[in-house]
Amino acid sequence: MTQIIEPTKKLGKLWNEIDWDHHKNHVRRIQERIFRATRKQNWKQIKNLQKLLVRSHSVRLVAVKRVTQENKGKYTAGIDGKIYTTSSSRMKLVEEVKALNPHNHRCQPVKRVYIPKPNGDKRPLGIPTIKDRIMQLIVKMAMEPEWEAKFEPNSYGFRPGRRCQDAIKQIWETIRFRDKRKSSAWVLDADISGCFDNINHEALLKRIPMFVLTIRRWLKAGVIEFGSFYQTKLGTPQGGIISPLLANIALNGMEREFGIETKNGFYYAPSSRKGMNKGISLIRYADDFIVCAPTRERITDYILPKLEAFLLKRGLTLNEAKTHIVHRDDGFDFLGFNIRQFSNISRTICLAKPSKKSVKRLLRNIKEILIRNKQAKAEDVIKRLNPIIRGWGNYYCSSNAKETFSYIDHNIWKMLWRWALRRHRNKGKKWVRYKYFPTVDGRSWVFSGNNGNRLIFMASIRIDSRYVKVKGYNSPYDPELHRYWQNRTRGKKYVD
């Protein structure tokens, strides 16, 4: 049973009077110093700054606020059943966390829950307690700037300032037809089998210079499932705040296997490399990645053996059922996009569109919402559908999705038309049309409610394929790139 912590009102007043900008800026300054020291390879300074950060009062305040007030899982309790929903309880929690030290913190086992996956299977999640989540976030904020200076340029998953669209843009730029000598026609669409659940603990800990004992305790904390305790010998629990960072650390170096850097650490373009590495590009998003190569034989004889050897050292293997070798003219799905090159006599063009699976999943979701709300008012249906339509459209607005958006709008209209006819079986179609689908601002057949709300058209979402991906090694923790990241945060994606 969930226990809500409720201390005194005086503490709540102190929480509301905190200058959050001051504390966030203080944490950010130390993180930028860690990043700069890593670039200079000043390992002693890195350790000192990380110790300074985890001991600071500001990082505890920021961590408590993010875990208990901002994150989606703020109302999800661990095995202790405690959540902190008021300002006073959060201020009391800060005092409790102040007495804890990441180096000797004794964490509790995680609570095992299962969530459905798109393919019908269930994904296991490990839910730590609130205090363990706070300590994980504190350690993550100290470790992330160091590893952001070490990560590879074409790694995009679970990293600050990077997202799926950056990976898709990089793939598009890699496989599109430009110069036959520089383009990569063959693609290895790979997937790691149970990445989070099978990472070898010792192989991961050998790569971490700081907080080794603390992370070892989190990895070995165990799982509580149906009241029984199970030891964890492999993997990082999905659901932990630090788990995505640990997975990225474990997989870091995969791209460097193919000679992406010079001895001085500068990026080496695939077309400029020599030998078997020439023309090979690896783009990774978390545990999903693709490798582009000039020939199919290069993938089977060189790339696959090298990847399998790399993963074996970390206790991982490729998922044979989800790993395919395809030609760019046949197309492939990645992160919900379908990327394919089309050729005819006059020209050749490479397009990135929403995948058919993603479109079917969206329409199925909308259909289920309408089935569950057969008797709901039109304005309530609009309130439920608009965030879904807008969010899905914004995810794909930087791709070639114009035709797909029109197709989705037409299918949504058909579902809403059937929904409206069912509600008024004794009324004519003309009456139903003018009640639910009036003409608004010169546009006909707009699904509207009595309060003036109307369903947005996905086709009205602006398609802009000029999206500029993040530059190779750029990181938000780099103090020299403040203006660059400010422009990207404000939506100025075309200013480098």
Image (cartoon, grey):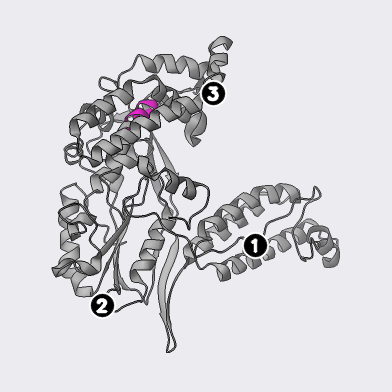
Q: Position of residue 477 (x, y in %)?
A: 36, 40
Q: Is there any visible trace of residue 211 in the rendered image?
A: no
Q: CA distance from mark 2 to mark 1?
A: 40 Å
Q: Which residues are magenta?
A: 133-141
Q: Position of residue 300 (x, y in %)?
A: 19, 69
- Name the amino acid type tagged 3: Thr
- Name the amino acid type tagged 1: Ser
**Mark 1 Cα within 10 Å, few/some/many (few <14, many 20+)?**
few
Nearest to viewer (mark 2 / mark 3):
2
Q: Position of residue 239 (x, y in %)?
A: 39, 37
Nearest to viewer (mark 2 / mark 1):
2
Say whether disc 1 or disc 3 marks the residue closer to the N-terminus: 3
Nearest to viewer (mark 1 / mark 3):
1
- Toward which corner of the image does residue 85 lie, by quadrant? top right
Number of the label disc, if any, that sits on residue 181: 2
The answer to whether the residues at label 2 and label 1 have Cβ atoms under 8 Å apart is no
The kind of secondary structure the magenta stretch mainly shows is helix
- In the depicted view, which residue is nearer to us: 227 or 415? 415
Number of the label disc, if any, that sits on residue 460: 1
Number of numbered tags placed on the structure image: 3
- Name the amino acid type tagged 2: Arg
Say which quadrant the C terminus sits in.
bottom left
Q: CA distance from mark 1 to mark 3?
A: 39 Å
Q: Is residue 205 left or right of residue 469?
A: left
Q: What residue did someone put label 3 on? A: 85
Which residue is pictured at 71% across the width and 47% down the height? 380
Q: Is residue 41 left or right of residue 110?
A: left
Under circle 1, the secondary element is: helix
Q: CA distance from mark 2 to mark 3?
A: 60 Å
